[in-house]
Amino acid sequence: MAENVVPRVRVPRDASAGESVSVRTLISHPMESGARRGSDGNLIPRSIINRFTCEFNGEMVIDVTIEPSVSTNPYFQFDAVVNETGTFAFTWYDDDGSVYTDTADITVA
Amino acid sequence: MTQTRRQFVGSGLAVAAAFFGLPHIASAAQLDEAIAAFTGGSDMANDGITLIAPEIAENGNTVPIEVDAPGAAAIMLLAAGNPNADVCTFNFGPAAGSHLAATRIRLAGEQDVIAIARMPDGTFKQARQTVRVTIGGCGG
Amino acid sequence: MTRKALLGGASAAIIAALAAGVGLADIRTGDSLVINGEIEIITETAPPEHLAGVFNTIYSGWVFRTDETRAMQADDFDNPGMLYVEQGIEAFNTAMGTEGNSCASCHENPESLADVRSTYPQWDEAHGEVQTVEMQVLECQTERMGVAEPYGYDSQQMRNMVALIASVGRGQLVNVAMDGPASEAWELGREIYYTQYGQMELSCAQCHENNYGNLIRADHLSQGQINGFPTYRLKNANIVSVHGRFRGCIRDTRGEPYAIGSPEFVALELYVASRGNGLTVEGPAVRN
């Protein structure tokens, strides 16, 4: 199981109604591809984040299907449109069944 | 039996390849399959999608990639020369503020990066760019 | 021809292939780096006095990297090295050892250590030796905190802690003392810098003083400055220590490296750090 998996997100604190805001996310994770061999010569089993989603007030912003070709510490940047004050909910799904979540609030004036 | 230096080096490489298990590189068939799974074999337009990738990546471990296809429902990223060509697929929801996404990907050597956008009307657009991956001078 | 001469001839050919002289032709100088829009980094400046006549300008390793790699260091969110700094912060606030203290018990917060990275290695009067930041951390753990199993010199935990200490000192002018009691170690470091190692018979200077900016295979040689350490290397997808990098360089000469934490590497670190006096602390920098 991956250790020290810590999600980080960055969204602006406030925005105007209907504005498109930039969202950045990063999660510390080795993204073990399953194609590498360990010092004992055996394949290291695949262990990756295979899906990431971002919702705003329950509405989907982006849903990403992820393969082993995404780098260690997966990083995503995208835009979300915000019409009202609310909360972003971020979810990362690990091969091992673990689910990591984070949230971020934004105030719409 | 005498063996030339070249034969010796060649056999050494073959042994090394067998021992270390050189990465299996995606066949053209695997790439075609991955694309067909996404497009259903439809024709693809070459406009309306922008792929931003470095011409030269300093290391294949972490290559920044950005795709933008205004109006797209989903964008699939592929690395034609990786052991598995699929990289990731961005599915945009109703709260998406644009149809742009950026990430960092692994590239096993110089190859084409391909982005394919699926539009809401069922048509497809593609962009492709060759990325050279620097072979570092120092393993240190 | 002797075997030694053959090897010497080979290494001479390699250096010739690097092309004689310094080639900054395809390096874009003159750009500035501001981290998070607020921390100003000096990436090129006049050399310290002891390098007058050697360099006209000293350059941070940042200058030798591509736009993409440079950009990753300009914002802490984009810099993967900051993930390790965060782990360092957690360790900083966690009690360890029989005394029940954390780093924060004495040092309050990491920012109180802002002056450390820029002035280390430095002479430690009580121990009668030049100490690196790592040695200082170990001293705290073993002499003041009662930690039975202190961090390994090059362990992930140690690199995290040193990255934290560097990060709070970013933007500070590197200013290590090379005179007084430190001069002996500095002289040793200088001697090591100009000594040819390994089957390739390469010294630090042959690549990083005589050939910076030139290509070694498809990679641009830097001046070998260490103001960005611990450095996040794309190659390792992790942060790398100064001594870890020294070891890698000597190994690449096909030589037998000194041990990590050895007096030789401490001396070399002091000397190489002094070659960057006038640059600013950047750790964790992002490099290839």
Image: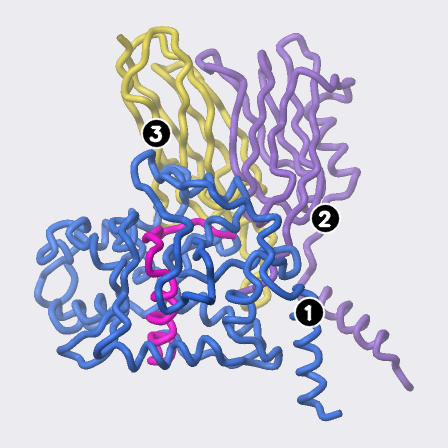
Chain colours: A yellow, B purple, C blue
Q: Nearer the viewer, mark 2 or mark 1?
A: 1
Assign a secondary structure to mark 2. Answer: loop
Would you say the residues marked 2 and 3 are in contact, meaning their CB atoms lie under 8 Å apart? no
Q: Position of residue B97 (x, y in %)?
A: 46, 14
Q: Is residue C154 left or right of residue B102?
A: left
Q: CA gap, disc 2 to disc 3?
A: 36 Å
Q: Magenta stretch: give its range.
A: C262-288
Q: Quick one: which residue is furthest to the front in this view?
A: C53
Q: Chain of mark 1?
A: C
Three-letter residue code for mark 3: Arg
| Residue located beneath label 1 in the image | C16
Please say whether residue C40 is visible from this viewpoint: yes
Magenta stretch contains residue C271: yes
Q: CA gap, disc 2 to disc 1?
A: 36 Å
Give the residue drawn at x 41%, y 49%.
C43
Q: Is residue A104 left or right of residue B114?
A: left
Q: Is residue C162 left or right of residue C19?
A: left
Give the residue drawn at x 74%, y 38%.
B30
In the picture shown, does residue C61 fall above or below B20?
above
Assign a secondary structure to mark 1. Answer: helix
Q: Position of residue C178 (x, y in %)?
A: 28, 72
Would you say the residues marked 1 and 3 are in contact, meaning their CB atoms lie under 8 Å apart? no
| Residue located beneath label 3 in the image | A10
| Residue located beneath label 2 in the image | B25
